[in-house]
C-alpha cells in the first residue's frame, strides 16, 4: 500500500512537471524555435569558418613551399658570393705578396726601398688569416729570412760608415734598425666603424676622408673676419737699417750673391747657350 501511494505521488509529480514543460513550450515555442535556429546557424557558420581556416592553411603551405625554395637558393648564393669575396681578397693579397717579394729580390741592394716593401708585407700578414695557406706560409718564411738579411745589411752599413766616415750610410743603417720606414698600425675603418683590411679599400677610404671636407657646402653665416691693416708697424734697429742699405747697394752694383749663395758670375752667364741643349733634356726640364 505504501509503495502504491509513493507511485501515485511520483506519477502526479511527473504529470505536473510534464504539464509545466508543455505549457512552457506552448507559451515560448516561437522563442525556443528561434534559439534552436540560431544554434543551427551558428553551427553552420563555425563549420564554414573551419573550412576557410583549413583552406587558408593549405594555401599558406603552398605559399611557404614557393617561398622556401627561392629563399634557400638565395641563401646558398649569398653564402657562395661571400666565400667568393673572401677567396678573391685572399688571391689579391697573394698576388700583392708575390709582387712585393719579386721586387725585394730584384732590389736587394736598395735597403730603403726593401724596408718599405717588407713593412707593407708585414701589414698584409697582420690583417689576414694566412695560416693554413701553403703559398702564404712559404712567403712568410721567406719574409723572415729577408728581415734577418736586412738587419745584417743594416749593421754592415753602420760598421762600414765608421770606417768611411759616411754619414749617409750610417743614417740608412740606423733608420732600418729603429724602424723609421715602418707603417702605422692604426686600423682604417669605414663610416660604419668596421675595420678595413684590404689595401685598395683603405686607400679609397682615405680619399673619401680627405674629399669630404672639400665638398662641404659654404656656410650660410660665415664668420666675419676683419681685414688686417696694410701698413703693419715694424720695429727696425739702426744696425739693421745699415745692413739693409749695404745689401741694396750690392744688389744694384751686381756684386751680391743670389739665392743659396750662388755666385753673381753664374747668374750673369749667357742664357743663349741653353738653347743649344738637346731637345730631350729641355723636355725633361
Image: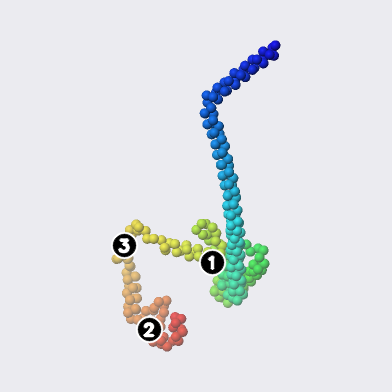
SS at badge 2: loop
From the top left corner, tell me how far across and down residue 194 is, in percent.
54, 58
Query: Quick one: 152 or 46, which is closer to the camera?
Result: 46
- In the image, what residue occupies the spot 45% across and 64% down? 211
Tell whether label 1 touches label 3 (CB within 8 Å).
Answer: no
Quadrant of image for the N terminus = top right
The colour scheme used here is rainbow
Q: Whole-Å distance between the Cαs marked 1 and 2?
A: 51 Å
Which quadrant of the structure image shows residue 248? bottom left
**Label 1 environment density (alpha carbons within 10 Å; few <14, some 14–19, many ≥20):** few
**Label 2 environment density (alpha carbons within 10 Å; few <14, some 14–19, many ≥20):** few
Query: Quick one: 154 or 194, which is closer to the camera?
Result: 194
Total numbered labels: 3
Q: Which residue lies under the disc numbered 3?
A: 227
- In the image, what residue occupies the spot 66% across and 65% down? 133
Could you say which disc has been placed on residue 200 in the image?
1
Query: Quick one: 66 or 167, which is closer to the camera?
Result: 66
Amino acid at each position: 500500500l505504501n509503495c502504491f501511494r509513493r507511485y501515485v505521488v511520483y506519477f502526479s509529480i511527473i504529470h505536473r512537471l510534464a504539464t509545466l514543460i508543455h505549457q512552457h513550450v506552448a507559451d515560448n515555442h516561437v522563442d525556443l524555435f528561434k534559439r534552436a535556429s540560431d544554434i543551427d546557424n551558428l553551427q553552420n557558420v563555425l563549420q564554414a569558418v573551419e573550412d576557410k581556416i583549413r583552406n587558408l592553411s593549405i594555401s599558406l603551405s603552398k605559399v611557404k613551399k614557393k617561398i622556401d625554395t627561392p629563399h634557400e637558393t638565395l641563401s646558398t648564393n649569398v653564402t657562395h658570393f661571400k666565400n667568393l669575396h673572401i677567396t678573391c681578397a685572399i688571391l689579391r693579397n697573394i698576388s700583392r705578396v708575390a709582387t712585393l717579394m719579386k721586387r725585394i729580390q730584384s732590389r736587394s741592394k736598395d735597403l730603403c726601398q726593401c724596408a718599405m716593401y717588407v713593412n707593407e708585407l708585414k701589414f698584409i700578414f697582420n690583417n689576414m688569416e694566412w695560416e693554413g695557406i701553403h703559398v702564404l706560409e712559404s712567403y712568410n718564411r721567406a719574409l723572415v729570412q729577408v728581415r734577418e738579411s736586412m738587419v745584417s745589411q743594416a749593421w754592415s752599413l753602420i760598421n762600414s760608415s765608421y770606417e768611411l766616415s759616411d754619414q749617409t750610410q750610417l743614417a740608412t743603417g740606423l733608420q732600418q734598425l729603429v724602424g723609421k720606414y715602418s707603417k702605422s698600425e692604426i686600423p682604417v675603418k669605414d663610416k660604419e666603424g668596421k675595420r678595413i683590411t684590404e689595401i685598395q679599400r683603405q686607400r679609397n677610404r682615405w680619399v673619401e676622408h680627405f674629399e669630404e671636407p672639400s665638398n662641404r657646402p659654404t656656410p650660410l653665416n660665415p664668420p666675419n673676419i676683419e681685414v688686417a691693416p696694410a701698413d703693419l708697424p715694424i720695429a727696425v734697429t739702426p744696425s739693421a737699417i745699415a745692413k739693409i742699405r749695404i745689401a741694396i747697394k750690392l744688389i744694384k752694383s751686381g756684386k751680391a750673391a743670389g739665392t743659396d749663395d750662388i755666385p753673381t758670375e753664374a747668374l750673369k752667364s749667357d742664357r743663349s747657350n741653353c738653347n743649344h741643349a738637346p731637345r730631350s733634356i729641355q723636355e725633361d726640364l
